[in-house]
Amino acid sequence: MKNYGPDFYNITDLLTEEELLIQQTAYDFVQAEFMPVINEHYENATFPMELVPKLGELGFMGSSLPEGSGGAGVSNVAYGLILHELERGDSGLRSFASVQGALVMYPIHAYGSEEQKDKWLPGLGAGTKIGCFGLTEPNFGSNPGGMATRCKRDGDDWIINGNKMWITNGSVADVAVVWARDEEGIVRGFLLEKGMDGFTSSDIHGKLSLRASVTSELSMVNVRVPDSARLPNIEGLKGPLSCLTQARYGISWGMVGVAVDCYNTALDYSKERKQFSKPIGGYQLTQAKLAEMVTRITEAQLLVYRLGRLKDEGTMTFQQVSMAKRNNCVLARDIAKISRGILGANGITEDYPIMRHMANIESVYTYEGTHEMHTLIIGQQETGMAAYDS
């Protein structure tokens, strides 16, 4: 087996042969095909679109969805391991697969009509079609209940007006899952296709984080769609929030992957870099840092492993996902910082992945629910009282 990272508590012994093989496949793909190009794409603020069909071919899009819905039918733990390895490559790579599977394929699978499923899921799963998810707005992120995008019934059609912000894959997507509020205040989901009249996108430039990811703004001006474009089997905020639960689950695994990559880099460096006649890994202060990091990684590994098994059992709650997302983003943030320190000045160069990971983690720490919002979700679960306005 490859050096996937520390396994201090022998967690790999709990994985099935299929799960281990899937992880190895994802690891090999990232090492062979993604790592040779990531620095160039990160510097140029582009995404390697040529790898998208390969992601589909390997079954990395919506992997835990049934094969009939474009997925690969693997366990949720296997899906988590895939995102673990993709994020070790770069958060932009994991974000692409996560959006495609959790935020586009999942709502079509869960809430779409048979016609919508037949039209979109095979291509999305194969990577021949690309999707995006439009929920966040310029003035509403943590409070989706304040949604300003509107949909109005007009005969057999709907007219949609509004803007969505910070949309991964927005300008390259063939289909957008867009959420809007109707005249009665009910939130509804729609599938908007690229090229529709009044539906445009523009990329967000100047990002210093998630540079190897396409991030866009969506604009809808009197976009007319037939009722067949509406997701028929969901109403209310439950729809988009259930999608976010799927995405946050994957992020929880991805943050372990990025922490592992930073740790492995620091550990290897500490064994080779000599100061005062011996490797810096032989000094107490460095060993204290490594011991703290491997302990926290082990805690996070146990957290996501158990979460994955709960998801496979069908008993996982969104509050449990919030705990894992909250904890593991902090974990990755801290480990990236400590690892960078162990590498000294070398840690800021593109010869090592840590500084790139550090910048990416800042986005992941905030998106799909900020640290503060997940704190309040857990607090409400424990006290029975909401500490934010409804």
Image (cartoon, rainbow, N blue to C red):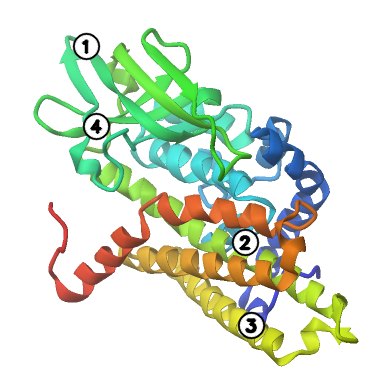
- Could you tell me how far apart the alpha carbons at marks 2 and 3 are, in whole angstroms? 17 Å
- Front one among 100 and 64: 100
Residue displayed at 70% across by 57% down: 348
Q: Is the N terminus in the top left, top right, bottom left or bottom right quadrant?
A: bottom right
The location of residue 180, given as percent across then percent down, is: 25, 29
Identity of the amino acid at label 4?
A: Arg
Mark found first going from the N terminus, 1 or 2 = 1
- Could you tell me how far apart the alpha carbons at marks 3 and 1 are, in whole angstroms? 63 Å
Identity of the amino acid at label 3?
A: Lys
- Front one among 57 and 168: 168
Compared across the picture, whether 176 is left or right of 73 comes to left
Picture layout, residue 55 above or below residue 11: above
Q: Say whether residue 215 is visible.
A: yes
Looking at the rendered image, the disc whose residue lies closer to the viewer, 4 or 1, is 4
Task: Kindly identify which numbered label has been placed on residue 156.
Answer: 1
Compared across the picture, whether 219 is left or right of 13 comes to left
Task: Kindly identify which numbered label has been placed on residue 188.
Answer: 4
The location of residue 136, given as percent across then percent down, is: 34, 37
Name the residue tied to disc 2.
258
Task: Kindly identify which numbered label has been placed on residue 98.
Answer: none
Residue at the far left in the pictured view: 184
Dot 3: element: helix
- Front one among 110 and 50: 50
Q: Which image quadrant for residue 16? A: bottom right
Compared across the picture, whether 276 is left or right of 356 comes to right
Dot 4: element: strand
- Could you tell me how far apart the alpha carbons at marks 4 and 1 are, in whole angstroms? 15 Å
Identity of the amino acid at label 1?
A: Asp
Q: Say whether residue 16 is visible.
A: no
Name the residue tied to disc 3.
289
Mark found first going from the N terminus, 4 or 1 = 1
Residue displayed at 69% across by 64% down: 261
